[in-house]
Every structure is written in structure tokens, then in C-alpha cells.
Image (cartoon, grey):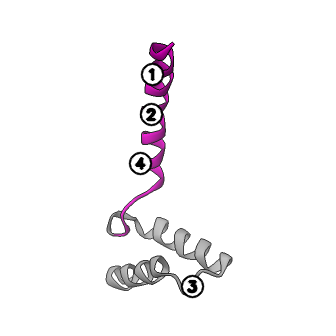
């Protein structure tokens, strides 16, 4: 029984880790298009005071977009 539990957990872990890696990307690795999209999403939700929003805006200024 313990082997069965480990087998199912082992199969799900790589998929979950891969999905998490594709979701998150460092701010300095974002393209200008991705950056604009994330800024727009945060503005729609009213999160313009967040630290993440400020970091995105700083990166946008650095890129000169």
C-alpha cells in the first residue's frame, strides 16, 4: 500500500513542479509584452500598491517601454 501511495505522489510531483515553473518567471526575464500584460492585470484588480506592481513598473522603466 505504501508503494502505491509513493507511486501516485511521484507521478504528480514532476507535473506540478513543471506547471509552477511555467507560471512564475523572474521580473528581469519577462518580455515587454509579458510585462505589459502583468501590469494590466494588476491594474484591473486594483493591486497598484503592491511591491510586485512597483517592481514591474521599475523594470518597464529600465527597458524604456
Would you place residue 63 above or below residue 32 in this image?
below
- The tag earlier along the polypeptide, 2 or 1, is 1
Q: Residues within 10 Å of mark 2 (few under 14, many from 20)?
A: few
Main secondary-structure element of the magenta-colored stretch: helix
Please identify the quadrant where the C terminus is shown: bottom left
- The tag earlier along the polypeptide, 4 or 1, is 1
- Disc 2 to disc 3, how far (Cα)? 34 Å
Q: Provide the residue span drawn in magenta.
A: 1-27
Q: Nearer the viewer, mark 2 or mark 4?
A: 2
Q: Which residue is mark 2?
A: 13
Q: Nearer the viewer, mark 4 or mark 1?
A: 1
The residue at the point 45 percent across, 14 percent down is 3
- Disc 2 to disc 4, how far (Cα)? 12 Å
Q: Nearer the viewer, mark 2 or mark 3?
A: 2
- The tag earlier along the polypeptide, 2 or 3, is 2
**Quarter of image, res 62:** bottom left
**Horizontal and vertical percent for residue 8?**
51, 22
Depth check: 23 or 9 in front?
A: 9
- The tag earlier along the polypeptide, 3 or 4, is 4
Q: Which residue is mark 1?
A: 6
Amino acid at each position: 500500500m505504501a508503494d502505491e501511495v509513493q507511486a501516485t505522489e511521484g507521478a504528480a510531483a514532476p507535473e506540478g513542479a513543471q506547471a509552477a515553473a511555467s507560471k512564475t518567471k523572474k521580473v528581469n526575464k519577462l518580455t515587454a509584452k509579458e510585462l505589459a500584460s502583468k501590469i494590466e492585470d494588476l491594474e484591473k484588480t486594483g493591486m497598484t500598491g503592491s511591491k510586485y506592481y512597483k517592481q514591474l513598473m521599475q523594470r518597464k522603466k529600465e527597458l524604456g517601454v
